Amino acid sequence: MRGLIADILESGGVEVVGEAGDGREALSVVAEVDPDVVTMDVEMPEMNGIEAVERLMAENPTPTLMLSAYTAEGAEETFAALDAGAVDFFAKPGGEVSMGVSRMEEQLVETVRSVAGADLSTAGRRRRSDAAAAAASAGGATPASTSASDPASPSGGATGADIEPNTTLIIGSSTGGPDAVERVVSALPGEADLRGVVVQHMPEAFTGRFATRLDDACELSVREAEDGMRLGRGELAVAKGGHHLEITNARNGRLRLTVIDEERGEGVRPSVNVTMRSAADVVDDPLIGVILTGMGGDGSDGVQALSRIGARVLAQDEESCVVYGMPKRAAATGAVDSVLPLGDIAAGITGEHS
């Protein structure tokens, strides 16, 4: 696998400056060659990828892409690695490994290049914040991660009092998105009259676990989207990986969702463009679109569709993004009403941040 990945990256113009057989060896190699980016398997002998990422971020912080098994167990381990500081992950396909990865070589090279340019100061913040909070509790200090001056700290005190009735919310994200989305939805008040969809670029084996993770973290009810699902007040659906998601009906404060298993020419599945365009077609009640951190340009067409019908559009600012790709492309369309730090997005949704 290491040889195959090295060959793919070299053929894509990425110089491979070192290899390692386990996490412990990886720490030594990184210290010696100081690479721009690391690809790290989750399952390894001697020291697994989660522990290796924790050590790496403490000793030689380097943008890291996890290589994850395409399984529910792999998803759980991958989210732990993201909490530890990894920037993103690439799901290894099942079946014949070499054939599966070779078919995805363009995506792998693009992802490695994107991760290499990531801002580590905004990646994997949750676990570090938890550690800082624990240390502060023991020592009586106030952790810096909760400072009001921290642009990626979640907004506090949101009440949802200013949000309009029957508001539909659509959030789109990619690289760095799992942590960013969690920070936004966990800051949304449960009493807010919201329902909506989260579109995160993620394989099918991971989106169910992501929905559970969000549900555990916030006051809203979060589930993975199913075909025909209806969403009411206080409910969010996570678009199913490998499929597009459309809002096909909006009536009496409830949304009807349709899961679509076809390409649609977007280059990614799920695509936030598809979901936002469908919402623009059928939602007559207040509508809010949000584009968070991620590589590529998905969402730039969708926000224009929302803007044309008078919907409110927010985008994450460059400073708080892990990768300033999707928000940058969205803002360049002129359809974005507000560009905000991650910590202010929830207040922007509830109307408490102008």
Image: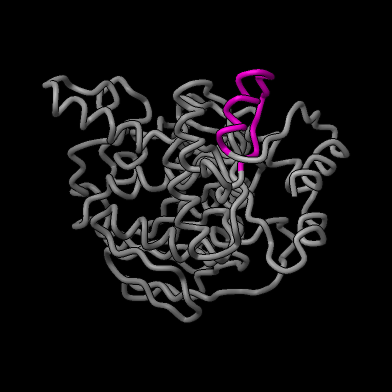
Write the residue at 59% across / 53% down. 68
Q: Is residue 166 left or right of residue 307?
A: left
Q: Nearer the viewer, residue 336 or 157?
A: 157
Residue at the extreme front of the image, as rendered: 46
Placement of the C terminus among the 4 image quadrants: top left
Write the residue at 42% across / 47% down. 181
Q: Nearer the viewer, residue 117 or 262?
A: 117
Note whether 147 is above or below 191 in the view shown.
Answer: above
For the magenta stretch, what is the residue range? 23-40
Q: Is residue 315 left or right of residue 151?
A: right
The x and y percentages for residue 130 are: 28, 35
Question: Which colour style is shown?
Answer: one colour
Q: How many marks?
A: 0
Q: Let me know if residue 34 is in the magenta part.
A: yes
Report which quarter residue 256 is drawn in. bottom left
Q: Nearer the viewer, residue 62 or 279?
A: 62
Q: Is residue 349 left or right of residue 171?
A: left
Q: Let me know if residue 35 is in the magenta part.
A: yes
Q: Nearer the viewer, residue 246 or 263?
A: 263
The answer to whether residue 335 shows anywhere in this view is: no
